[in-house]
Amino acid sequence: MRSDLSILEELGASLAPAQDDPPAEVRHRVMNGMRHPVRRPRLLSRLSGVRLAWGIGAPAVAAAAVAAALVAGQLADIAGGQPAPPGRGTDVEAGTGAVPLAPPGAEQVLRLAAQHAAATPAMDARPKQFLFIDSVEIESKIDSGRTTVSGPLPTRTWLSVDGTRDGLVIQEVRRSSTRTHIDGCTNGRQAQTVDRPATTPEVACTPEPAYRPGRVPTDAAGLLAYVYSVAAAEPEWVSVGAGPDGRPSGYVRLSADQRAFTEIAEILYKNHLPAVQEAAFLAAGRIAGVQVRRDVADAAGRAGVAVTRTEAGASHELIFDPTSYRYLGYNIIGAEFDQTTAKVVRSPNSRKGTAQIRLGPNPKPGEVIYKSALLGIAVVDKAGQRP
């Protein structure tokens, strides 16, 4: 059976005929390796076994799906008239016919998470410094029709505080480590593919700060409008079926609501400023179709409560501590996908902007596609430095 990589190469060629400049590389990478090393605005993209960087119509394709994002900080008491966390308190005193408080719904969980983010003191970070993110990941990889899951993989990331300096990702895999360069946005220019700055042309860019205000709004309404604008400009498509040659037989476009939700997960990973995280949680609570799933675990094995949104065979989960509502991580889990009710097209049409494709066999319901858990964050002076 042909590998996914060969299928992708042919698919890229068919969707984007050769230009004067050669197309960007097509790299085969684990399903949700460290976030987007492919192209802005994605920092490291994760997909069903692939990472794409060739063009569909206009710019380049960035593989979809996301990575985790987490806010570290001391546990903050959540009081002031807000719902009690699960397992805490009742609506009346014991012995007087008390009825346990109902567990909070999705919007309540996200509101409590926003309160935790707002109560987290901002760290002192200068523009020239880096945000160090210590995390673990569980990754699913598809090759020649076979799926393997690896992890937890210790992953350490250095992101530029102001977004203008080159970052770094180091991930430990089987007694060795892989290093991924993250090209910074310097003087408004950046390599087209983040991890291959020497071999791809520079394109215009806007810095993406890791711990400062930037183009992402710090109020819920503004951030919600922003993620929906991204959803419109950067649609995501999911492949459906496969023909005799192994290539997809069609594609389904994700809804704007699903893209907005996954873009919020992107933001949570890329910018850890408490004000940004607070706005992201409140915005997520305003997206239709979000639900609560209890008794989940992150990549580090920590128990949590998840706010999820499911579509096209994948459930995207934001994981929170069930008591403090501190953000723990991000999961992508296989889900049911009724293709008979989906609108399938023969080829994705991105028109303008960046299209994203999730390629490969649909995972089985409950199957882990990707997990990431934050262990801690800190501010350091240079990429590669440990706190």
Image (cartoon, rainbow, N blue to C red):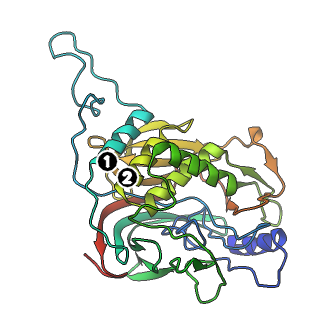
* Above or below 386: residue 345: above
Upstream in the sequence, badge 2 or badge 1? 1
Furthest-front residue in this view: 187
The kind of residue tagged 2 is Ala
Q: Is there CB contact under 8 Å for labels 2 and 1? A: yes
In-image side of 236 versus 226 (left or right): right
Furthest-bottom residue in this view: 198
| Location of mark 2 (residue) | 275
What is the distance, in whole Å, between disc 2 and disc 1 at their CAs? 6 Å
Relative to the observer, which residue lies in front, 228 or 237? 228
> Circle 1 — which element?
helix
| Location of mark 1 (residue) | 118
Picture coordinates of residue 123, whole percent (x, y): 27, 63
The kind of residue tagged 1 is Ala
- Residue shown at 62% from the left, 68% from the top: 50
Q: Quadrant of residue 20?
A: bottom right
Relative to the observer, which residue lies in front, 3 or 169? 169
Tally of numbered discs:
2
Q: Quadrant of the C terminus?
A: bottom left
